[in-house]
Amino acid sequence: MDWLSFTLITTLIKIVGLCFVAILGLVSYTVYAERRVSAIIQDRVGPNRVGLPLTLLGFKKDVSFLGLFQPLADGIKFILKEDFTPAHVKKFYFWLAPALCLVPALLTCAVLPFGSSITIPWNGSERTIPLVIANLNVGPLFVFAIASLGVYGIVLAGWSSNSKYPFFGSVRSTSQMISYEISLGLSLVPVLLVMGELNLVTISQQQSEHGWNLLPYSLRDGFDLDRWLLLIPLGLAFVTFVIAMFAETNRLPFDLPECETELVGGYHTEYSSMKFALFFMGEYAAMIVGSGITVTLFLGGWSLPLGLDNYLPKGTVWVGLLHTAVFFSKLIAFLIFFIWVRWTLPRFRYDQLMRLGWIWMFEICLANVLLTAGILWYIS
């Protein structure tokens, strides 16, 4: 088999494994984790019943498995519910909007390096498989460009519903995402200045060798005062990036586009069945990709802390699997942080949201770019 066929097969396997197994599987169990974690925070039980229905087979008791089959039950419920389309909506755009929310979130995961690489024997020779679907030199720009398309799905959902509450929600989402995309982009600039790269694979590789951006210590290199000095602007960039990510994904305390206390359900008020499920999946997929970008840029991506990867063999299968497990462990920890924030902080008022984005976040991010440039000039 030639190189082209090998590349096509491995790329297809990575697409199916990452987008349709890992990401959509994480979407299902992030919903489950959100319900369980919120139940723990509020001293409730949460979903704990759905498991193997052995009583249907004549046994005396079902096996609950702590309710781990709840996502499967929810999926079946969404499929079987009536797909109701109100008569007053603009049907084509009403049907198109949910897909426009989910597809961009799945496309952006293509540039996420979820592991290092593995080398396998193939037709008498060894071939290396990078654990990333698309190794682009402009990875963060690709993520921002594609992810920003998700707002069109929200706008179309609100406009095509011909209802005032969804329309208010879509207008809120448009202004909110435009406002915080500026902060999101500016908060990324210090990282790119320090790393000198826009390639997410290279950024992860550099952190594996010299320490993470938020833990700049490597056993091989020792203590580097310059790296620790850069921790000041990188730490500030991390905080502003995470805040902007919460606003971009419409998560509490910035979930104004779907604010139940004011807008019923926001832009998806008129939706039901699988169309509503697609909005739900799009929101959680965006959370997962946002967490993956944060982990890659600031927490070393797939790399182990303290530069331990320098002492591991390169390209072996078990090391590649270890790096993949490390990446998803960090990603899941960040998703739990997303959930914890939602059930801890109150919702902002809309004027507070806009004031934070334009008067505080924008200026802080811009000042941080200047601070990073000044520190780099000082240590050069």
Image (cartoon, grey):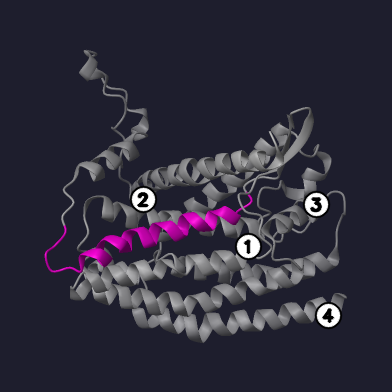
Classify 263 as above or below 201. Answer: below
CA–CA distance in space, label 3 to label 4: 23 Å
Q: Is residue 316 left or right of residue 274?
A: right
CA–CA distance in space, label 2 to label 4: 46 Å
Residue occupying image coordinates x 38% and y 50%: 41
Residue linked to disc 2? 38
Is 261 magenta? The answer is no
Residue linked to disc 1? 139
CB of mark 3 within 8 Å of CB of mark 4? no
CA–CA distance in space, label 2 to label 1: 34 Å
Residue occupying image coordinates x 27% and y 50%: 274
The x, y position of residue 196, in whole percent, is 76, 68
Residue linked to disc 3? 209
CA–CA distance in space, label 1 to label 4: 26 Å
Q: Amino acid at mark 3?
A: Glu
Classify 109 as above or below 262. Answer: above
Choose between 200 and 187: the one closer to the eye. 200
What segment is highlighted magenta in the picture?
A: 85-113
Residue linked to disc 4? 377
Lower position in the chain sequence, tag 2 or tag 1: 2
Q: Amino acid at mark 4?
A: Trp
Q: Please, which residue is most extreme toward the front here? A: 2
Q: Quadrant of residue 328?
A: top right
Q: Please, which residue is most extreme toward the top here? A: 58
The x, y position of residue 65, in whole percent, is 37, 28
Is residue 363 at all visible to an observer of this figure? Answer: yes
Lower position in the chain sequence, tag 1 or tag 4: 1
Q: Amino acid at mark 2?
A: Ser
Structural crowding at the residue carrying mark 4, measured as other residues with C-alpha within 10 Å and reported as few (<14), some (14–19) or many (≥20)? few
Q: Quadrant of residue 50?
A: top left
Is 99 magenta? The answer is yes
